[in-house]
Image (tube, helix red, strand yellow):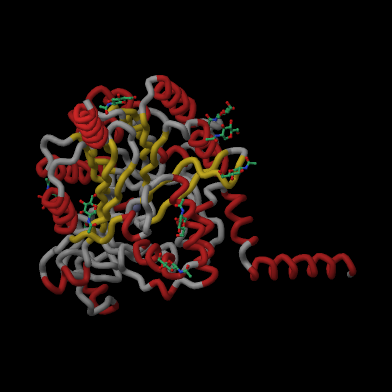
C-alpha cells in the first residue's frame, strides 16, 4: 500500500512540475532604420553621405558597417538584430514589436508613404525570418507623418499599416485600424496581451492636446477590456511604445522630464492600480535604454502591485536631448514566462557590442545578462523588484550592475554618482510626477538646501 502511495506522490510531483509550462517571446523595439546611412558618411550628420560642404566641416571619423553611436541604424544592423533573434531563439510563442521604425531626421525628408515604406521594409524583414510566428506590433511616435502628430481617429497611415499587418492582426484588424490598439489572446496559454496606442497620451502630440480627458476613448476601452479579461480569468501583459513616468536619463538637465501629459499619466497609473490583480507585467520602449518602473497600491505607497519593463532599442543613436541621455549598444530581449499563470520567469537581454562589431566586421550578438542572475532575484514580481530597488539605492555594487545595463553595457557606471543615482532610483519607484519630485527632493541634501535657500529668499523679499 505505501509503495502505491509513494508512486502516486511521485507522479503528482512530476505532474505539478511539468504543469508550469514555460513559454517565450521576443520583445524588440526602436529600430529607427535610416535608409540614408552610409558606412563612410558624416558622423556629425546622421552618417549621411558627405556633401562637399559637409566634408570640410564634418568629422574625419568613419561610421562602421553595422552603425555608429552617433547615428540611427543602417539596414545591416536591423537585419543583424533579426538574424540574431532567429539564430538564438527561432520559435518564440510570439514577438512584441513596439515601434519607432524611422530615423531621427527632419520631417522634410518624409511623407506618409515614405514612413509606410520603412515600416513595410521592417515588416518584411521580420516576416521572412519568422514566417510562422505571430508578431504583435504597435506604432511609435516616429511612425507617423508628421512625427508625433497622431490623431485619435482613423487615418491614412494607420489604414495602410493595418493592411501591411493584416495577417498578424487577424481579428484585431478593424480595432487597430480605427484606434491603433487591440487585445489578443495568446494561443495555448492563459495570457492576453493588451496593446495600447500610447501616442494619444504624448505631450508632443498636438492632435490630442486639447481633447477631453480620454482621447480615442482609450482609457474607457482599456478599462472595459481589462474588466472583461478579469471575468475570463486571463493573465494580462500591457504593451505599448511610450511609457508612463519620467525619463531616467534626462533628469539632471530637466528635473521631472516626462512624456505623457500629466492628466493621462495619472489615469494610466489608475488603470494599472484598478486592474493590478490581472496585469502580470507591462512591456514598453521609447527610451532606448534598459530600465524598469514600479507601481504601488492606490492607498498604500509601500505596497508594490505592478511593474513595467523598458526594453532597450536596436538603434545606438546618441540622443540629441542632452549629454546625459547618451548612446547605447543595440539590444533585443527574450522573455520566458509561465503559460498558465503569466508570471515572468526570466528576462534575457541580448546585445551587440557595436564598436567591436565594426572593428571585427562581424556582428556577434551575445547574451548581455539574465535578470534573475544579475540582480540575485529568486522571482520577478513587484515585491522582489521593489526590494531589489531599495537595496540598489544604497548598494553601489547592485546599482553599478543596473547602470551598466541601462545603456546596454556601453557607459561606465562611474559617471553616475549621488544625484544621478538618486534620480534613477526615483524614476524607477515614482511614476507619478509629483511623487517623483518629492522623492528626489526628500532624499537629496541639495534639494533641502535649495528649499532652505528658497525659504530664506522669500523671507528676505518679505523683509524688504
Ligand atoms: C534620403 O536622402 C534623400 C536625399 O537627401 C532625401 O531626398 C530623402 O528624403 C531621404 N530619405 C529619408 C527617409 O530620410
Ligand atoms: C529594406 O531596405 C534595405 C535598404 O535600406 C534593402 O537593402 C532591403 O532589401 C529592404 N528589405 C526589404 C525586405 O524590403
Ligand atoms: C479606477 O477605479 C475607480 C474606482 O472604481 C474609477 O473611479 C476610475 O475611473 C478608474 N480609473 C480608470 C483609469 O479606469
Ligand atoms: C489596494 O488598495 C485598495 C484600496 O484603494 C484595496 O481595496 C485593495 O485591496 C488593495 N490592493 C491590494 C492588492 O492589496
Ligand atoms: C502597506 O503595505 C506594506 C507592504 O505589504 C505593509 O507592510 C503595510 O502594513 C501596509 N500599510 C497599510 C497602512 O496597510
Ligand atoms: C489556464 O488556467 C487554468 C486555471 O485557471 C488551468 O487549469 C489551465 O490549465 C490553464 N491553461 C493553460 C493553457 O495554461
Ligand atoms: C538565461 O536564461 C535563459 C532563459 O531561462 C536560459 O536558457 C539560459 O541558460 C540563461 N543563461 C545563463 C547564462 O544563465
Ligand atoms: C530583499 O533584498 C535583500 C538584499 O538583497 C535580500 O537579502 C532578501 O532576500 C530580499 N528579500 C526578498 C523577499 O526578496
Ligand atoms: C551589495 O550587493 C552585493 C551583490 O548582491 C552583495 O554581494 C554585497 O554584500 C552588498 N553590499 C552591502 C554593503 O550590502
Ligand atoms: Zn525611439
Ligand atoms: Zn519613441
Left or right, residue 162 beside residue 217: left
Q: Tally the marks.
A: 0
Residue 224, given in percent of the width and then of the height, sits at: 45, 23
The residue furthest front is 1
The answer to whether residue 313 is above or below residue 161 is below
Residue 365: quarter of image:
bottom left
Residue 184, image x, y percentages: 30, 28
- Of residue 188 and residue 117, the one placed in the foreground of this image is 188
Question: Along the line of sight, which residue is nearer the eye, 41 or 85?
Answer: 85
Looking at the rendered image, the quarter that the N terminus falls into is: top left
Q: Quadrant of the C terminus?
A: bottom right
Task: Answer with the quarter of the image where residue 190 lies.
Answer: top left
What residue is at 16 percent from the left and 70 percent from the top? 358
Q: Is residue 188 visible?
A: no
Instruction: Tell me residue 218's x, y (percent).
Output: 45, 29
Measured along the vertical axis of the image, is residue 93 above or below residue 125? above
Q: Nearer the viewer, residue 99 or 310?
A: 310
Residue ranking furthest to the right: 463
Q: Residue at x 19, y 45 (%)?
A: 122
Inspect this view and state whether residue 115 appears: yes
Amino acid at each position: 500500500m505505501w509503495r502505491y502511495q509513494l508512486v502516486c506522490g511521485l507522479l503528482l510531483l512530476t505532474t505539478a512540475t511539468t504543469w508550469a509550462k514555460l513559454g517565450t517571446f521576443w520583445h524588440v523595439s526602436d529600430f529607427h532604420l535610416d535608409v540614408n546611412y552610409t558606412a563612410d558618411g558624416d558622423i556629425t550628420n546622421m552618417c549621411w553621405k558627405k556633401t562637399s560642404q559637409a566634408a570640410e566641416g564634418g568629422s574625419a571619423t568613419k561610421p562602421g558597417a553595422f552603425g555608429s553611436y552617433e547615428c540611427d541604424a543602417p539596414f545591416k544592423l536591423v537585419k543583424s538584430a533579426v538574424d540574431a533573434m532567429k539564430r538564438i531563439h527561432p520559435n518564440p510563442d510570439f514577438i512584441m514589436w513596439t515601434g519607432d521604425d524611422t530615423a531621427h531626421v527632419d520631417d522634410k525628408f518624409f511623407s506618409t508613404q515614405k514612413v509606410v515604406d520603412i515600416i513595410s521594409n521592417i515588416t518584411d524583414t521580420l516576416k521572412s525570418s519568422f514566417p510562422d510566428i505571430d508578431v504583435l506590433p504597435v506604432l511609435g511616435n516616429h511612425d507617423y507623418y508628421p512625427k508625433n502628430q497622431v490623431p485619435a481617429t482613423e487615418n491614412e497611415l494607420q489604414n495602410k499599416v493595418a493592411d501591411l499587418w493584416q495577417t498578424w492582426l487577424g481579428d484585431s484588424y478593424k480595432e487597430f485600424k480605427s484606434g491603433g490598439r487591440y487585445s489578443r489572446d495568446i494561443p495555448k496559454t492563459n495570457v492576453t496581451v493588451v496593446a495600447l496606442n500610447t501616442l494619444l497620451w504624448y505631450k508632443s502630440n498636438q492632435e490630442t492636446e486639447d481633447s477631453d480627458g480620454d482621447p480615442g476613448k482609450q482609457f474607457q476601452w482599456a478599462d472595459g477590456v481589462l474588466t472583461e479579461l478579469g471575468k475570463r480569468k486571463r493573465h494580462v501583459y500591457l504593451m505599448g511604445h511610450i511609457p508612463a513616468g519620467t525619463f531616467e536619463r534626462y533628469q539632471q538637465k530637466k528635473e521631472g522630464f516626462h512624456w505623457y501629459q500629466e492628466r493621462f499619466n495619472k489615469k494610466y497609473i489608475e488603470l494599472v492600480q484598478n486592474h493590478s490583480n490581472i496585469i502580470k507585467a507591462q512591456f514598453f520602449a521609447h527610451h532606448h535604454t534598459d530600465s524598469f518602473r514600479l507601481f504601488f497600491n492606490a492607498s498604500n505607497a509601500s505596497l508594490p502591485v505592478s511593474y513595467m519593463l523598458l526594453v532597450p532599442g536596436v538603434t545606438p543613436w546618441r540622443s540629441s536631448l542632452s549629454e546625459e541621455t547618451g548612446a547605447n549598444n543595440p539590444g533585443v530581449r527574450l522573455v520566458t514566462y509561465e503559460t498558465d499563470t503569466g508570471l515572468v520567469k526570466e528576462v534575457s537581454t541580448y546585445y551587440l557590442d557595436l564598436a567591436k562589431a565594426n572593428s571585427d566586421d562581424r556582428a556577434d550578438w551575445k547574451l548581455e545578462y539574465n535578470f534573475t542572475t544579475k540582480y540575485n532575484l529568486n522571482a520577478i514580481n513587484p515585491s522582489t523588484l521593489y526590494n531589489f530597488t531599495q537595496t540598489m539605492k544604497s548598494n553601489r555594487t547592485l546599482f553599478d550592475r543596473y547602470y551598466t545595463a541601462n545603456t546596454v553595457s556601453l557607459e561606465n557606471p562611474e559617471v553616475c554618482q549621488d544625484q544621478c543615482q538618486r534620480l534613477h532610483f526615483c524614476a524607477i519607484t515614482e511614476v507619478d510626477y509629483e511623487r517623483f519630485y518629492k522623492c528626489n527632493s526628500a532624499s537629496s541634501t541639495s534639494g533641502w538646501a535649495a528649499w532652505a535657500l528658497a525659504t530664506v529668499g522669500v523671507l528676505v523679499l518679505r523683509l524688504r
